[in-house]
Image: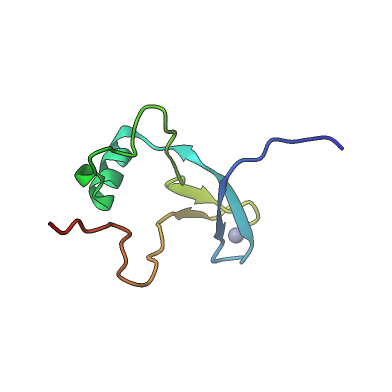
């Protein structure tokens, strides 16, 4: 059997025609990394999970439906619950 490389992708559903579309990950920019670090509180970590060897990716800002060609801005849906994943360090 032939082999193909596989990569992570984002999926979104077109609100007009209802089909699922798949988007390639795009590399995160320096500005995005700064925002992510601030949002996630990674500055508080002694050893940052961010370094040059890590390839951080995000989703595209604008997506276009492959069927109806409608354009949408993207946003990250809130996941419910107040667990922000940040371990509080109680001293
Ligand atoms: Zn569509």
Which quarter of the picture shows residue 24? top right
Residue 63 position (above or below residue 34)? below
Instruction: Report x, y in % for residue 10.
Output: 54, 51
Quadrant location of the N terminus? Answer: top right
At x 60%, y 51%, the residue is 22
The foreground one among 27 and 70 is 27
Q: How many marks?
A: 0
Please give the name of the residue rendered at 29% of the width and 38% of the height, measured from the top-left corner: 48
Q: If the image is split into quadrants, where does the C terminus sit?
A: bottom left
* Rendered location of residue 42, percent (x, y): 26, 45
Q: Is residue 11 above or below residue 7?
A: below
Residue 76, how many percent across, how many down? 40, 58
Q: Left or right of 68: which side holds 50?
A: left
Residue lying farthest to the left in this orientation = 91
* Residue drawn at point x = 69 percent, y = 35 percent: 5
Front in this rendered view, residue 64 or 7: 7
Identify which residue is drawn at 31% across, 33% down.
30
Quarter containing ligand 1? bottom right
Which residue lies most toward the bottom here?
81
Image x and y of residue 73, in percent? 42, 54
């Amino acid at each position: 059997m032939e082999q193909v490389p596989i990569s992570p992708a984002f999926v979104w559903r077109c609100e007009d025609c209802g089909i699922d579309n798949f988007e390639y990950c795009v590399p995160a920019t320096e500005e995005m990394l700064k925002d992510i670090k601030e949002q996630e509180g990674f500055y508080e970590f002694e050893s940052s999970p961010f370094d040059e060897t890590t390839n951080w990716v995000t989703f595209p800002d604008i997506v276009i439906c492959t069927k109806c060609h409608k354009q949408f801005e993207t946003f990250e849906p809130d996941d419910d619950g107040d667990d922000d994943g940040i371990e509080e360090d109680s001293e």
